[in-house]
Amino acid sequence: MREVLSNLLEDKHIENYPLFKEFVFERTDIYDSLVCLI
Protein backbone atom coordinates (compact mmCIF):
# COMPACT_ATOMS: atom_id res chain seq x y z
CA MET A 1 0.00 0.00 0.00
CA ARG A 2 2.82 2.41 0.81
CA GLU A 3 4.35 1.73 -2.59
CA VAL A 4 1.05 2.60 -4.25
CA LEU A 5 0.82 5.90 -2.36
CA SER A 6 4.41 6.71 -3.25
CA ASN A 7 3.74 6.02 -6.91
CA LEU A 8 0.68 8.26 -6.84
CA LEU A 9 2.65 11.03 -5.17
CA GLU A 10 5.39 10.76 -7.75
CA ASP A 11 2.83 11.00 -10.53
CA LYS A 12 2.13 14.74 -10.67
CA HIS A 13 -0.70 14.46 -13.20
CA ILE A 14 -3.19 12.30 -11.35
CA GLU A 15 -6.28 12.20 -13.55
CA ASN A 16 -8.39 10.54 -10.87
CA TYR A 17 -7.20 12.74 -8.03
CA PRO A 18 -10.72 13.48 -6.70
CA LEU A 19 -11.41 9.75 -6.51
CA PHE A 20 -8.04 9.17 -4.91
CA LYS A 21 -8.75 11.94 -2.41
CA GLU A 22 -12.08 10.38 -1.46
CA PHE A 23 -10.38 7.01 -1.14
CA VAL A 24 -7.78 8.47 1.21
CA PHE A 25 -10.22 10.40 3.39
CA GLU A 26 -12.45 7.35 3.74
CA ARG A 27 -9.49 5.54 5.30
CA THR A 28 -7.85 7.73 7.92
CA ASP A 29 -5.05 5.24 8.54
CA ILE A 30 -3.98 5.55 4.90
CA TYR A 31 -4.37 9.33 5.10
CA ASP A 32 -2.13 9.45 8.17
CA SER A 33 0.53 7.40 6.41
CA LEU A 34 0.27 9.72 3.41
CA VAL A 35 0.83 12.76 5.63
CA CYS A 36 3.86 11.06 7.17
CA LEU A 37 5.35 10.57 3.70
CA ILE A 38 5.06 14.26 2.84
Image (cartoon, rainbow, N blue to C red):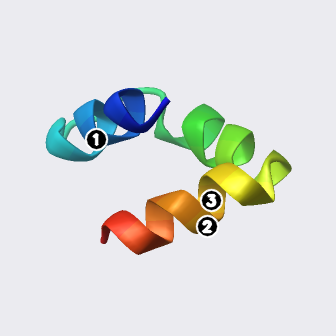
Which of pointers 1 and 2 lies earlier in the amino acid sequence?
1
The three-letter code of the residue at mark 1 reads: Ser
The three-letter code of the residue at mark 2 reads: Asp
Q: Are marks 2 and 3 in contact (CB under 8 Å)?
A: yes
**Residue identifier under label 1:** 6
| Horizontal and vertical percent position of residue 24 | 66, 47
Look at the picture and state if 8 lies above or below 33. Answer: above
Which of pointers 1 and 3 lies earlier in the amino acid sequence?
1
Q: Residue at x 33, y 64 (%)?
A: 37
Look at the picture and state if 35 lies above or below 17. Answer: below
**Residue identifier under label 2:** 32
Quarter location, residue 36: bottom left
Q: Residue at x 28, y 41 (%)?
A: 6
The three-letter code of the residue at mark 3 reads: Tyr
Mark 3, Cα crowd under 10 Å, few <14 / some 14-19 / many 20+, is: some
Q: Residue at x 18, y 35 (%)?
A: 11
Quarter location, residue 7: top left
Mark 1, Cα crowd under 10 Å, few <14 / some 14-19 / many 20+, is: few
Secondary structure at badge 1 equals helix
**Foreground residue, 36 or 7?**
36
| Horizontal and vertical percent position of residue 34 | 47, 59
State the separation of the CA atoms marked 1 and 2. Answer: 13 Å
**Residue identifier under label 3:** 31
Look at the picture and state if 4 lies above or below 26. Answer: above
Secondary structure at badge 3 equals helix
Mark 2, Cα crowd under 10 Å, few <14 / some 14-19 / many 20+, is: few
Which corner quadrant holds the C terminus?
bottom left
| Horizontal and vertical percent position of residue 32 | 61, 67
Look at the picture and state if 36 lies above or below 4. Answer: below
